[in-house]
Image (cartoon, rainbow, N blue to C red):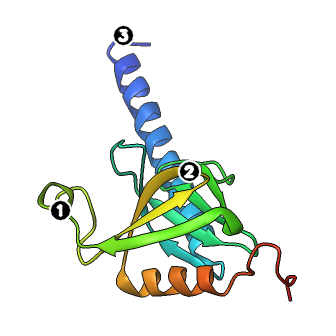
Amino acid sequence: MDDSVFPFIILASAFGLLVLTLCLVGVRRFNLRRALGTVDASICTAGNSWRMGVCRYQDSELEWFSLLSLSFRPRHSFKRSSLELLGRRKPSETELTKLQPDVVVVELRHEGESFMLAMRFEAYAGLSSWLEAGPVIGVGTWR
């Protein structure tokens, strides 16, 4: 074989692997988003940068999945009973370039650690309703 064929084979293999990975990420996102109780939401924990992902409401947990991952396990999981809604605000000027358009920044606290979620207002309304509908600790039981 000619030596000029090897770089082409390597580049074609790398391109094929890239396309396969992008397809798998797309299939994973489609599967996450088709489930009931999921919304697109970026997260910022402990002053780090914003990361895009998907939030999923469970009975007793709020789970956050990274958008650019192949894992079906949540990267962050927050207990509903320990989650406290601190408020919402519009994104700052520096955040506007890092976030999707038309989002609100939701400030939350979980077990003493503060973090922020950026989501559409409709998703924020769902999150606040989900939190308010949860049981009070020590009073009553789950229905």
Local packing at callout 3 (Cα closer than 10 Å; few below 14, some 14-19, many 20+) is few
The residue shown at (17%, 62%) is 92
Q: Position of residue 100 (x, y in %)?
A: 27, 68
Image mark for residue 3: 3
Q: Mark 3 and mark 1: span between their CA atoms? A: 55 Å
Q: Position of residue 43 (x, y in %)?
A: 43, 56
Is residue 104 among the parts visible in the rendering? no
Residue extending furthest toward the top: 3
Residue extending furthest toward the front: 138
**10 in relation to 99, above or below:** above
Q: Mark 3 and mark 2: span between their CA atoms? A: 61 Å
Mark 2, secondary structure of its residue? loop
Q: Nearer the viewer, mark 1 or mark 2?
A: 2
**102 in relation to 72, above or below:** below
**108 in relation to 143, above or below:** above
Hey, which quadrant is residue 104 in on the image?
bottom left
Amino acid tagged 3 = Asp
Image mark for residue 92: 1
Q: Nearer the viewer, residue 132 or 75?
A: 132
The residue shown at (56%, 70%) is 30
Residue extending furthest toward the left: 93
Q: Which residue is mark 2?
A: 112
Q: Nearer the viewer, residue 89 or 8?
A: 89
Q: Are marks 3 and 1 in contact (CB under 8 Å)?
A: no
Local packing at callout 1 (Cα closer than 10 Å; few below 14, some 14-19, many 20+) is few
Q: Position of residue 127 (x, y in %)?
A: 53, 79
Q: Are marks 1 and 2 in contact (CB under 8 Å)?
A: no
**Which quadrant does the N terminus fall into?**
top left
Q: Nearer the viewer, mark 3 or mark 1?
A: 1
**113 in relation to 83, above or below:** above
Mark 3, secondary structure of its residue? loop
